[in-house]
Image (cartoon, rainbow, N blue to C red):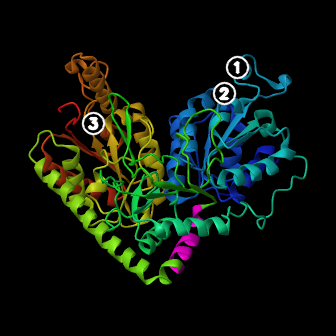
Amino acid sequence: MSDIKKSEQRWQSDVIVDLMKLYDIPYVALNPGASYRGLHDSMVNYGENDPEMLLCNHEKIAVQIAHGYAKASGKPMIAIVHDVVGLLHAPMGVYYAYIDRCPVFVIGATGPMDEKYRRPFIDWIHTAFAQGDAVRNFTKWDYQPGSIHGVPDSFARAYSIMMSEPQGPIYMCYDSALQETPLTDDITIPPASAVRVPSRIAPEQAVVAEAAEMLVKADNPLLLTEYAARMPEGYEPTVELAETVGASVFDVCKRLGFPNRHPLSMSFNPDAFAGVDLVMALDVVDWTRGSHKLNTQTREITVVTTPDCKWVDAGFADIEISKWATDYNKHNNWDLRVMGDTSITIPALTQACGALIDADAALKERVAERKKALADKHEQQWSKWQKQVESEMDQRPMTESRLAYEVWQAIKDEDWVLTAGTLKDWVQKIWDFDQPYRHPGRELGTGTQIGMSIGVALAHKGQGRLVVDLQPDGDLMFDLGALWMPIKYDIPMLVVMYNNRAYYNDWAHQIHMAHQRGTDPDRAYIGMDLEAPPPDFAHIARGMGWYAEGPIEDPAEVVPAVRRAIEQVKAGKPALVDPIVWRRDINT
């Protein structure tokens, strides 16, 4: 290290690196750009590449890796995007981090804002006024400090805003001239003892007591959970509340909020809300999930709870509601709203409900009877799913249920983590999600999964866990270059393709349109299929340095192939297996 040439001068961009270290940023994902060349040099030579830089082939991937890392670990990392053009590559990743409540510290650059220092042409097109406008509608905060004196304060504020619940991405923009100016002033950064994030929002005790009364008086209460569980907390408290009250639980799966094999789990059960007379929503945005049935052709919605069902909201209500996108869902006429962080609210509810139940022998007996009835209902539905798997075993190509079953046979004795894809929810109907870290949450839109999955694998690197990505083919086609990163940075992960050789979801929509309009459903493949030629994902992965097998047409070959791939992953190498899956909606 002594032979490496060091600058005798400190630079203003060094202060940003000091802040990265102070705030324990583990990684910085980036795609290189001249607008932050000063910061880049400071990270490499002043900071000694600590935090470690991860070179990404697209700014969207950089943001998505940080997104997946935060979901799996609960800790933020930085994604850096190159001024105007790099920032314009990133918005989809930033938007999904926003609606998925994930803390991502996005750094950009601009300028120089002082025209005197701009290079002809290039610096002019790379400079924008209010550059944060590009992502302002789906970040919690954005800022561009006017001088180096504003950098420490704004960095600290950005971190606090990003990490305060409900969490979300922020955007910090640094003038390139600010970065490249020698540091001559004494800049004070926050002390290590400074409070970084304020305390959490606690609910009113009287409202918690009212909610507890409603819960214990209900004949058939259900807990609907979406964001109440967030790594590394929230999973066990929800189990405790459900067991205390004898309530069924329906998990929206934006995070893994409840063990799917628990006797009180009604997740994905088509009759989960039948007869429910109280729904307690635990940090829920998608409150219609499960309780509202949609006719996909007519868009007609049917509510399946009892007509007089009570609805209680426990969470952040309308805090941080978007002014731009309607990700906040339809408004509900709640019977009670408990404003507060569910990490505080759920234990308080459990305590209040427990006290009421302990004081009432008849109520205690009713809770016990309800738990037994729900356990029977859970087992009946689980048995139906297993019988459906058996009934589809001989179909060729294999169904989603068969693929979920085969992969489970190969991984069930491993300490596994599922990244994002759920094979149209079949994994929750076959696998055993018995630990909170098993799954950071379900997939989002197309063109998001591989980046997030790499971030999840990065978060679990070195912990001896098998990270599994059930990877849709259409999603991977957006970002094939991302396969290079796990090789370069030694990120072991197992990718099992969910390959139906189509943009499956939209193909199904076109079939719905054909049935509704009386047109030919056999023409729905036009503009949808990934055929002629079908991508050879195993060949592509091998070209990036992965171990890979496929395409696999015979379901019996899946388990041996996955087991061979697992051995490669355990040796530290990413591996891909490419089975071909039946397109369910197309063949029905």
* For marks 3 and 2 on the same chain, the one whose residue lies earlier in the sequence: 2
Residue drawn at x 44%, y 39% is 482
Q: Is residue 131 left or right of residue 326?
A: right
Residue drawn at x 68%, y 61% is 201
- Which residues, given as a range, are shown in magenta? 342-355
Q: Residue furthest left?
A: 394
The residue singled out by tag 3 in the image is 539
Disc sitting over residue 125 in the figure: 1
What secondary structure is the magenta-colored segment mainly? Answer: helix
Q: Residues within 10 Å of mark 2 (few under 14, many from 20)?
A: many
- Do callouts 2 and 1 mark residues in contact (Cβ within 8 Å)? yes
Say which amino acid is labelled 1: Ile
Q: Quadrant of the N terminus?
A: bottom right
Q: Position of residue 266 (x, y in %)?
A: 34, 59
Towards the viewer: 239 or 146: 239
Q: Position of residue 397 (x, y in %)?
A: 14, 39
Magenta run includes residue 259: no
Q: Residues within 10 Å of mark 3 (few under 14, many from 20)?
A: some
| Secondary element at image label 3 | helix
Say which amino acid is labelled 3: His
